[in-house]
Structure formats: C-alpha cells, structure tokens
C-alpha cells in the first residue's frame, strides 16, 4: 500500500503542481486558501493533459447522513440503500483522477490505476 505524499498548497509554484498532476501519483494538498479555485486549476491541468476528473466531497469527520441513520435503525433498509448506491455508481464511466475534498482547506488527488474509456470531446 502506497502512502500519498502531502504538500502545502500555499507554498507551491504552478510548475510544481503541474509536475504532481503529470506524475500520476496520488497526493494530498493542505493549506488551501481558496478551495474552489484550486480545484478548478487542478481540473484544468488534468484536462490539458487529456485526463478526465471528478470531484468528490468526502469530509474526514462527516456528520451522520441518512444512510447511516437508516443502517442503524433497520439493517435491511441499509443494505438496500447501499445496493442502490452501488448500482448507480456502476453506470458512470470512471475518471482518470478523483479530487476528494476532505475539508475546507485540504483535498487529495487520487489517480485511477485501470484503463478508462476514451471520451469524445
């Protein structure tokens, strides 16, 4: 299991960020002042390199959601909920990179290891 390296976004130059994206190794960014513009910059770099990306909001200490509550109350309903979510995600084509927003000042970039279907643009 590889561990993603951590970088401080507020200390990075554009060429360093482009190098991280081009290396296709997972990494974690902290100290991001403007998260939306950072995500937009990274997605633009990935697109320029011919990669598809998606953004996933996955806070490290998320509040319990409806799925968690249903799972605690009725395990059968929780199982159905998880199955429906899993089936819904299989219809989407996989992205080359996933940007996981883990807080309001950090995100991780995870690259797909398998081949992704070509996209028409």
Image (spheres, helix red, strand yellow):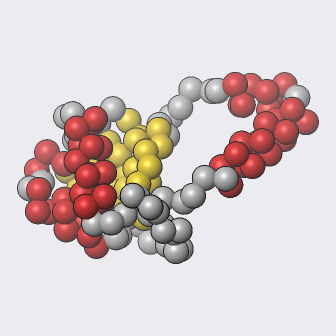
Q: Does residue 8 appear left or right of residue 75 in this picture?
A: left
Q: Nearer the viewer, residue 71 or 53?
A: 53
Q: In the rendering, at what x and y percent does residue 114 appear?
A: 53, 74
Q: Residue at x 54, y 60 (%)?
A: 94
Q: Position of residue 12 (x, y in %)?
A: 12, 54
**Residue 64 against residue 52 in the figure, above or below:** above
Split into 4 quadrants, where in the image is the C terminus?
bottom left
Q: Which residue is at 72% across, 31% downward? A: 67
Q: Position of residue 101 (x, y in %)?
A: 40, 41
Q: Residue at x 64, y 27 (%)?
A: 65
69 to the left or right of 61: right
Q: Nearer the viewer, residue 107 or 114?
A: 114
Q: Is residue 32 left or right of residue 83?
A: left
Total labels: the figure holds: 0
Quarter of the image where one finds residue 3: bottom left
Please identify the residue farthest to the front as the structure is shown.
121
Tell me: residue 7, above or below residue 20. above
Image quadrant where residue 5 sits:
bottom left
Q: Is residue 102 visible?
A: yes
> Would you place residue 57 above or below residue 64 in this image?
below
Where is residue 68 shown, x and y percent of the image? Answer: 71, 31
Left or right: 67 as drawn, with respect to 61: right
**Residue 75 can be seen, yes or no:** no
Question: What residue appears at the point 19 percent right and 59 percent down from the top-left corner?
Answer: 17
């Amino acid at each position: 299991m590889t561990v993603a390296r951590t970088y401080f976004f507020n200390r990075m130059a554009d060429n360093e960020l482009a190098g991280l994206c081009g290396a296709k190794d997972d990494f974690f960014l902290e100290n991001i002042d403007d998260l939306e513009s950072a995500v937009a910059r990274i997605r633009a770099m990935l697109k320029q390199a011919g990669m598809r990306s998606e953004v996933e909001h996955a806070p490290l200490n998320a509040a319990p959601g409806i799925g968690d509550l249903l799972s605690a109350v009725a395990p059968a309903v929780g199982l159905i909920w998880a199955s429906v979510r899993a089936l819904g995600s299989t219809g989407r084509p996989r992205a080359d990179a996933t940007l996981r927003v883990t807080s309001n000042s950090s995100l991780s970039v995870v690259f797909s290891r398998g081949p992704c279907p070509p996209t028409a643009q």
